[in-house]
Amino acid sequence: MKKILILLLLLLPLAATAQGELYKRYASRPDMTVAQVSGFRLGDSVRVDVVLMVADNEAAWQQMKKEFKLKGQEGVESWLGDPRQPAQHVKWTGAPVVRAIASHSRRTLAFYRLDTEAQYDALIDYQLEKMNKEKK
Amino acid sequence: MMNEERFEKLWQEAEAEGHGGRLAKGYSAWRQRQRRIGAVAAVTAVLIITAVPLLTPHQSMDYEHVYCNRTGSTDAQWADLAAEMLIEI
């Protein structure tokens, strides 16, 4: 019993940065490169988990477009999605969401997991700050 | 510190003096205490190992960990892509 308890305690640090459901769902796909950036820093004390999916070819991208109901052909699309079904658009109510960003030119989808209002605000602040820097 | 050799010596002395039973009882209690100390030390070590990474600030790192289903890109490249996607809009 003690050994099991010790083993569980040893595994605790690993659990803090576990693979997310979204990553696990898509990581086995042969036609896309999938990465999860855990603890991506948005601010001094705010971090989020990000899942990135890059289609390996045009056919894979077309398939992703269908799955995530992307309508455009170029530029970038962004929406708030249900963490379990990111294709499903939701409104911010304070419940966990994913900020989804799709870039047609990069054939890439990015999902930023937002569990708290602090993360939601930090993401917007991060975007504004980076965009201002870019302009300068 | 008690060890097997020392215990054997004590045991022989105690047997000779007719105190074998008392020594056996004492030894059993000592072993139990040692086991308890070992368990507490192990749990303490695990708690320290667990707590230190969680409590250590990672302010200098832009990410904590990267998982990827392919090789070819570095963790930093993925973190850069996560940052770039946010300003694509």
Image (cartoon, grey):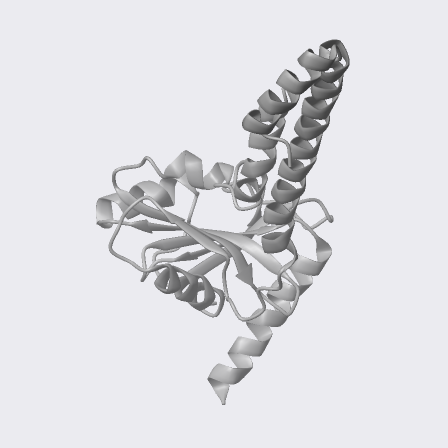
Q: Nearer the viewer, residue B63 or A63?
A: B63
Query: Which residue lies at the image location 46% right of the left edge and 66% below the top edge?
Result: B83
Asked if residue A115 lies left or right of residue A104, the reply is: right
Q: Nearer the viewer, residue A96 or B12?
A: B12
Q: Look at the image and tell me in which quarter the N terminus of chain B lies.
A: top right
**Number of marks present in the image shown:** 0
In the displayed structure, A122 sits above or below B39; it is below
Indicate the quadrant where residue B38 lies: top right
Q: Nearer the viewer, residue B89 or B63?
A: B63
| Outermost residue to the bottom | A136
In the displayed structure, B41 sits above or below B3; it is below
Indicate the quadrant where residue B26 lies: top right
Q: Residue A4 location in percent, x, y?
A: 58, 24
Query: Which residue lies at the image location 68% right of the left edge and 13% below the top edge?
Result: B16
The answer to whether any part of residue B34 appears in the image is yes
| Outermost residue to the front | B16
Query: Which residue lies at the image location 58% right of the left edge and 66% below the top edge?
Result: A42
In the displayed structure, A107 sits above or below B77; it is above
Q: Nearer the viewer, residue A112 or B41?
A: B41
The answer to whether any part of residue B24 appears in the image is no
Q: Residue B15 location in percent, x, y?
A: 68, 12
